[in-house]
Image: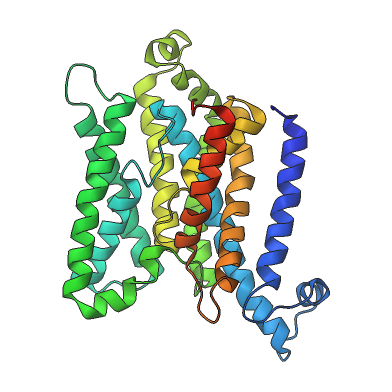
Amino acid sequence: MRRSTPLVIAGGVLALALACLLSLMVGARTVSPGTVMEALRSHDGALADHAVIQSRLLRTAAGVAVGAALAVAGAAMQGMTRNPLADPGILGINAGATTAVVLGVYLLDASRVAQFMGLALLGAGLGTVAVYAVASLGRDGATPVKLALAGAALTAGLGSLINALVMVDDSSLDRLRFWQVGTLGARSLRDIAGVGGLMAVGAVVILLAAGVLNALALGDDAAVGLGVKVGRARMLLGAAIILLCGAAVALAGPIGFLGLVVPHAARLLVGGDYRRIVPVCLLGGPVLILVADTVGRVIAPPAEVQVGVMTALLGVPVFVVLLRTRRQVGL
């Protein structure tokens, strides 16, 4: 079922353009494609439709940034750990970032995205170190199974701590209840630009290191034989993953399944070469999160279902289809 990579990239660009258009059109007040184009060419703030499109433009930009960051981080984690189930949500990185933000809100009264970003990066880094340290115990080192178990245990433990903190403080609960399930709304251009720079650095590092991911996916011995300095490569890739995940969590909250599903879909389309998988993830992640966000706006009117809930609802059946298609999930 492998397709030509240029054809897949072209299809991904088209799908992303359509997802962005839908994101700008659909919501409590639906507007036509012509109105969207008119608002983008010559915005008039006095027109109600143009004001709606302007608000959705920031939401769409946030979705593109977060979707690309989580999908690329998921692909890098799967290659680096040789674990097909690796995902920022499963390996405890999102849980570490979320816990740090919740503690910041509870103890330091943090409320701005810039504050969330510093806390999320710190928490993501500590979560990564904790999972890798626990998984490395024993003679066989950090095997894929031990990494997944350590990540699941850390996620469960930190999840209980988060629930306890938000339940004992009503003001923290009010500020966190939408962020905690993942949301793209109410983000300013300053917020998006602030985390966008970190996301760009992380994505560029992983794009440039895609060949190294191919070597690491073969195993440490094979990677060393190919001239890769394994320890240094893992530190560099780990830092890039922390930048991507920490920035995404700071902007939109913990969003699961995206970093797991999109790399597998990309692998199904273009094969197992990370030099092809990572660019496809850059397009596929934003498409999935924008579709999930758009469906969440209209599925239960007049309320909105937050994007973190929708990515899980859409991601589970998509992942089941991928499993049935490939018979097994591998690297």
Q: Is residue 118 visible?
A: yes
Q: Is residue 114 visible?
A: no
* Residue most extreme to the bottom: 46
x and y, in percent, of residue 166 in the image: 23, 70
In the depicted view, which residue is nearer to us: 211 or 7? 7
Q: How many marks?
A: 0
Give the image quarter of residue 33. bottom right
For residue 258, side relative to residue 115 (left or right):
right
In the depicted view, which residue is nearer to us: 58 or 322? 322
Quadrant including the N terminus: top right
x and y, in percent, of residue 300 in the image: 53, 74
Rendered residue at 34%/72% (across/down): 177
For residue 3, side relative to residue 114 (left or right):
right
Give the image quarter of residue 133. top left
Rendered residue at 54%/37% (across/down): 263
For residue 193, side relative to residue 254 (left or right):
right
Rendered residue at 62%/73% (across/down): 56
* Above or below, comparing residue 163 to residue 301 in the picture: above
Colour treatment of the image? rainbow
x and y, in percent, of residue 237 in the image: 42, 34
